[in-house]
Image (tube, rainbow, N blue to C red):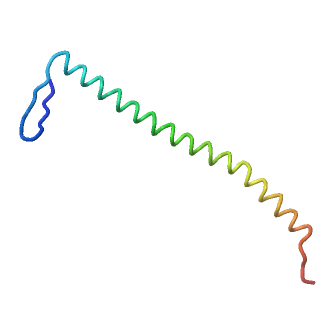
């Protein structure tokens, strides 16, 4: 049994309609949760891919600058 109050009026939903509303709400919440998980997963994969490229490049540039950099003697 579900009670929904809007504009001061209470509507009671019972039986198969209550089950239908409950299933619809559960599906919407599951979809929103899945969407949030996929967004975080995409961000994590993107950051990992960027770091896998940037960190080795930074190391290579540091080695090159150490080899060819001018030092005061």
Seen in the picture, residue 26 relative to 16 is either above or below; the reply is below
Seen in the picture, residue 36 relative to 63 is either above or below; the reply is above
Can you say which quadrant of the picture contains the C terminus?
bottom right
Q: Residue 40: image x %, image y %?
A: 51, 43
Q: Residue 19: image x %, image y %?
A: 23, 19
Seen in the picture, residue 6 relative to 1 is either above or below; the reply is below
23 left or right, relative to 41: left
Q: Residue 67: image x %, image y %?
A: 91, 67
Q: Quadrant of residue 20?
A: top left
Total labels drawn:
0
Q: Quadrant of residue 27?
A: top left
Q: What residue is drawn where x is 40% and y is 35%?
A: 32
Q: Residue 60: image x %, image y %?
A: 83, 58
Extreme top residue here?
16
Q: What residue is drawn where x is 6% and y is 36%?
A: 9
Q: What residue is drawn where x is 13% and y is 30%?
A: 3
Q: What residue is drawn where x is 57% and y is 41%?
A: 42
Extreme front residue here?
7
Seen in the picture, residue 49 relative to 17 is either above or below; the reply is below
63 left or right, relative to 45: right
Instruction: Decide which of 72, 33 is in the foreground and name it.
Output: 33
43 left or right, relative to 10: right
């Amino acid at each position: 049994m579900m009670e929904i109050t809007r504009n001061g009026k209470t509507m009671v939903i019972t039986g198969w309609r209550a089950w239908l509303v409950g299933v619809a709400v559960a599906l919407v919440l599951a979809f929103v949760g899945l969407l949030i998980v996929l967004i975080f997963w995409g961000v994590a994969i993107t950051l990992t891919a960027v770091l896998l490229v940037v960190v080795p490049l930074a190391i290579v540039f540091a080695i090159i600058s150490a080899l060819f950099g001018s030092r005061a003697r």
